[in-house]
Image: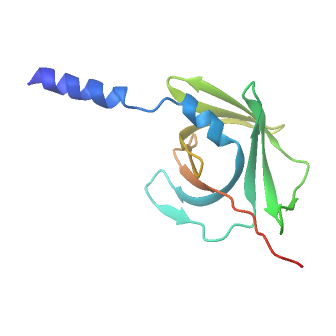
Amino acid sequence: MKNYFWLLCLFIFSCSPNPEIYIEHVEGYWEIEEVTMANGSKKEYKFNETIDYISVNDSLKGFRKKLKPGINDTYFTSDNAETIQLKIEDNKLNIYYTTPYANWTETVLEATPTQLKIVNEDENVYLYKRYTPIKLDLE
């Protein structure tokens, strides 16, 4: 019976996703959908005034910036941005943030073409959906 337990554990851990596949999906425009707090409570976001834009280069460095979306692919922003670096550590994809005022780390739990799930140091889980720009036919 013990052998079956160890085989089951080996199967479960061998099926965990490779965090490298998340890297290609992190970049882009993201809109927060919900936050699950460490205590289990949830906060849903039906409407967002701002979205996050994440840019990552080939050396896995980049920035995250808050944007206010306008119409027809226009965005309003300040010059403020958080410097980021992506690193794979202990079979996890971590995002290291740096500003003049603070440094912190978040871990990517899942990244697909349509969804991004991140946990922060306080164990709050942020669920984002890919932002769809507002398009209006003005003619």
x 21%, y 22%: residue: 6
In the image, residue 14 sits, relative to residue 79, either above or below, namely above
**Which image quarter: residue 131?**
bottom right
The extreme front residue here reads 139
x 75%, y 63%: residue: 133
In the image, residue 60 sits, relative to residue 35, either above or below, namely above
In the image, residue 48 sits, relative to residue 32, either above or below, namely below
In this view, the residue in front, 92 or 23, is: 23
Residue 91 % position (x, y): 50, 25
Residue 93 % position (x, y): 57, 31
Residue 65 % position (x, y): 79, 48
x 12%, y 22%: residue: 2
Left or right: 64, with 114 as reference point: right
The extreme top residue here reads 3
Residue 33 % position (x, y): 58, 61
Colour scheme employed for the rendering of this structure: rainbow
The quarter in which the N terminus is drawn is top left
Left or right: 24, with 123 as reference point: right
Counting every numbered tag in the picture gives 0
The quarter in which the C terminus is drawn is bottom right
**Which image quarter: residue 120?**
top right
The extreme bottom residue here reads 139
In the image, residue 17 sits, relative to residue 3, either above or below, namely below
